[in-house]
């Protein structure tokens, strides 16, 4: 019997968090998939295995309530009833009504609004020195998704805070303080959304909450869907923007005429979401190992996106890369519902930033968030002069 390859890669080590890609390359050279004892999970390092993990229906997202149950109930409730934590047929039932509101036409109608928000935010900064994350990349998708759902703009700062508190739970080994903050954010967040859903039931408006309130979903399911959209609708976009911008500025690059191609490269080059876990419901072979029923396997999206078997010069940022089959939005039944919105927002915000400040440059060293799963920068000080 062949022995299973193992890895002791420390996903929380500062060097790995700072730049995981050389570590992924070294692992990939040894094995596409390896058992990771510290997390009790298989890790996948190449494009083919990551893709299999996300596509194979026997590898599912199976939600397990976090414990202690009493304390964690507000957090668990928001996850147990949302599409992302369920598999078909439940996943299909929860995704379909939300997906219908996200068709392309609807997203295209938002484009002028995104342009307007980008211009307003850029008009408010001091060009000599500003934090492009806090003053631009963060508020833009929060305002867009709040508008789309019909959440009053005055709540934008709270949405950002609640979302941050909740997503910290997705990191490896969250501390008790992180757990408490996530629970309290879940209570406040769900409270606001429940109130808005109640209002829209009596007085529907032209927004996504009203559309969802009119579906067959239960109130808990609607609340979970809205919170998911608000969180997923900005967390990753902020970090894709920050990671891509820093990569370009450090290399003296700027977007070429094909801005959407540059956005795809931002998504590929330094993935904002690095790890998604699945559990086997039957034995499945992935990259030469057999994942037994009940065992877990994690797709490392960032590792897949630097696989030399799929990408030429994978460690080079190519603003005009032609063939870019990255997995930053996932693949399979959980493929990102917001991908068309994220792509449009990123293309508009990247284009607006560079056309306003063609000589944009880093003004100081960017500050990392210091987390592995959600990879990004907390602060990116930049400066430039008006075109
Ligand atoms: C650049 C920004 C974004 C990135 C990189 C991203 C990435 C992803 C990934 C990798 C998944 C799959 C998770 C898995 O396989 O387990 C996902 C799912 C999802 N994303 Fe995004 N996302 C982004 C923006 C958005 C936006 C703007 C929205 C909504 C407005 C959104 C809503 C969702 C939803 C609802 C799901 C769950 C889909 C399902 O389970 O069927 N995302 N996203």
Image: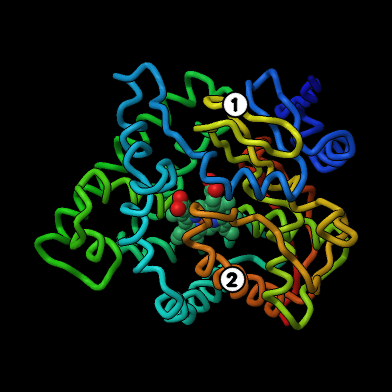
* Observer-nearest of 190 and 6: 6
Residue extending farthest front: 1
On screen, residue 182 versus residue 344, left or right, reads left
Residue 272, image x, y percentages = 65, 49
Residue 17: image quadrant is top right
Residue 359: image quadrant is bottom right
Residue 16: image quadrant is top right
Residue 301, image x, y percentages = 68, 47
Query: From what the image shows, is residue 161 above or below residue 168?
Result: below
Residue beneath label 1, please?
A: 292
- Kindly tell me whether residue 108 is visible in this rendering: yes
Query: From what the image shows, is residue 68 above or below residue 223?
Result: above
- Determine if the C-beta at disc 2 is less than 8 A from ligand 1: no
Task: Say which element carries label 2.
Answer: helix
Residue drawn at x 41%, y 73% is 103
- Determine if the C-beta at disc 1 is less than 8 A from ligand 1: no
For mark 1, does the 10 Å Cα neighbourhood hold few (<14), some (14 to 19), or many (20 or more) residues? some
For mark 2, does the 10 Å Cα neighbourhood hold few (<14), some (14 to 19), or many (20 or more) residues? many
Residue drawn at x 35%, y 36% is 80
On screen, residue 199 versus residue 319, left or right, reads left
Residue drawn at x 59%, y 26% is 292
Residue drawn at x 48%, y 39% is 61
Name the disc covering residue 135, or none: none
On screen, residue 197 versus residue 357, left or right, reads left
Nearer the N terminus, badge 2 or badge 1?
A: 2
Residue 107, image x, y percentages = 45, 75
The quadrant of the picture occupied by the N terminus is top right
Spatial separation of the CA atoms under disc 2 and disc 1: 52 Å
Residue 330, image x, y percentages = 59, 53
Residue beneath label 2, please?
A: 122
Task: Say which element carries label 1.
Answer: loop
**Labelled pair 2, 1 in contact (Cβ < 8 Å):** no
């Amino acid at each position: 019997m062949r022995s299973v390859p193992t890895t002791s890669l420390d996903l929380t080590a500062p060097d790995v968090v700072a730049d995981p890609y050389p570590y992924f390359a070294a692992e990939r050279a040894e094995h596409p998939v390896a058992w990771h004892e510290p997390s009790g999970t298989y890790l996948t390092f190449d494009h083919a295995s990551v893709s299999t993990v996300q596509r194979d229906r026997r590898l599912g997202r199976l939600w397990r309530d976090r414990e202690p149950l009493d304390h964690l109930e507000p957090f668990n409730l928001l996850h147990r009833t949302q599409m992302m934590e369920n598999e078909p047929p439940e996943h299909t039932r929860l995704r379909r009504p939300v997906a219908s509101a996200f068709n392309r036409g609807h997203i295209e109608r938002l484009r002028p609004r995104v342009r307007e928000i980008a211009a307003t935010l850029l008009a408010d900064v001091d060009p000599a020195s500003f934090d492009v994350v806090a003053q631009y990349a963060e508020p833009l998708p929060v305002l867009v998704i709040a508008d789309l759902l019909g959440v009053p703009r005055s709540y934008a700062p709270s949405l950002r805070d609640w979302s941050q508190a909740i997503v910290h739970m997705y990191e490896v080994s969250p501390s008790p303080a992180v757990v408490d903050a996530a629970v309290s954010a879940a209570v406040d967040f769900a409270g606001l959304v429940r109130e808005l859903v109640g209002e829209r039931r009596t007085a529907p408006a032209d927004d996504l909450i009203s559309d969802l309130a009119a579906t067959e979903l239960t109130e808990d399911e609607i609340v979970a869907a809205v919170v998911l959209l608000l969180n997923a609708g900005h967390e990753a976009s902020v970090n894709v923007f920050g990671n891509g911008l820093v990569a370009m500025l450090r290399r003296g690059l700027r977007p070429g005429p094909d801005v959407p191609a540059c956005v795809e490269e931002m998504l590929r080059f330094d993935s904002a979401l690095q790890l998604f876990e699945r559990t086997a419901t039957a034995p499945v072979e992935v990259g030469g190992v057999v994942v037994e029923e009940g065992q877990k396997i994690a797709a490392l999206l960032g590792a897949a996106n630097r696989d030399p078997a799929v990408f030429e010069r994978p460690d080079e940022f190519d603003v005009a890369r032609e063939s870019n089959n990255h997995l930053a939005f996932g693949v399979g039944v959980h493929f990102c519902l917001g991908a068309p919105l994220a792509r449009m927002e990123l293309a508009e915000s990247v284009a607006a930033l560079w056309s306003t400040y063609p000589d944009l440059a880093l003004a100081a060293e960017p500050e990392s968030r210091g987390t592995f799963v959600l990879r990004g920068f907390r602060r990116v000080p930049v400066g430039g002069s008006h075109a």
